[in-house]
Amino acid sequence: MGLEKNTQRITETTINGAAVTIIPDAVVGGIKGTLVEFKNVINITDTSQFRGYAATRQPIILVVSPRTEMISSTVAKMVRASKSDMRIFNPAKNSCSTCTKS
């Protein structure tokens, strides 16, 4: 997709007071820009990683594989609340389309 791999860690405190360190797969527009996370799994659920993303209060683009069947409503709401979106990556076309799974 033409994005540079990110290696910078971001540590945030979630709403329940837990410290979580995340390493977004990519960051667009600098470390305070849009966070990009790629997932190649069947089910995406609310994990400490996603709670850490939400705690940053930064836009989050979630890119999933065509094999993803379910994205938890909590994760979907968190991504939408960040004023961003979820996308499905099509490796055959090297392109993304809007993801409406949840």
Image (spheres, grey):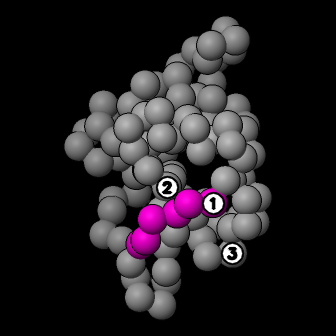
Q: Which residue shows up at 43% across the image and 71% down it?
A: 97
The reply, left or right, for residue 83 in relation to residue 53 is left
Q: Which residue shows up at 30% across the image and 69% down it?
A: 2
Q: Is residue 99 magenta?
A: yes
- In the rendered image, is residue 15 in sight? yes
Q: Residues within 10 Å of mark 2 (few under 14, many from 20)?
A: many
Residues under labels 3 and 2: Cα distance? 14 Å
The reply, left or right, for residue 46 in relation to residue 34 is right
Q: Are marks 2 and 1 in contact (CB under 8 Å)?
A: yes
The reply, left or right, for residue 25 in relation to residue 44 is left
Three-letter residue code for mark 1: Lys
Three-letter residue code for mark 2: Met
Measured along the vertical axis of the image, is residue 40 above or below residue 57? Answer: below
Classify residue 77 by image quadrant. top right
Label whose residue precedes the other's in the sequence (1 or 3): 3
Label whose residue precedes the other's in the sequence (3 or 2): 3
Q: How crowded is mark 3: few (under 14 residues within 10 Å), some or many (20 or more)?
A: few
The reply, left or right, for residue 58 in relation to residue 101 is left
Residues under labels 2 and 1: Cα distance? 9 Å
SS for callout 3: loop
Classify residue 67 by image quadrant. bottom right
Q: Which residue shows up at 39% across the image and 44% down it?
A: 84
Residue matched to label 3: 67
Residue 9 rendering spot, x and y as whole percentages: 48, 34
SS for callout 1: loop
Give the label on residue 1, or none.
Answer: none
Segment colored magenta: 96-101
Q: Which of 71 and 37 is in front in this view?
A: 71
Give the label on residue 101, or none.
Answer: 1
Residue matched to label 2: 86
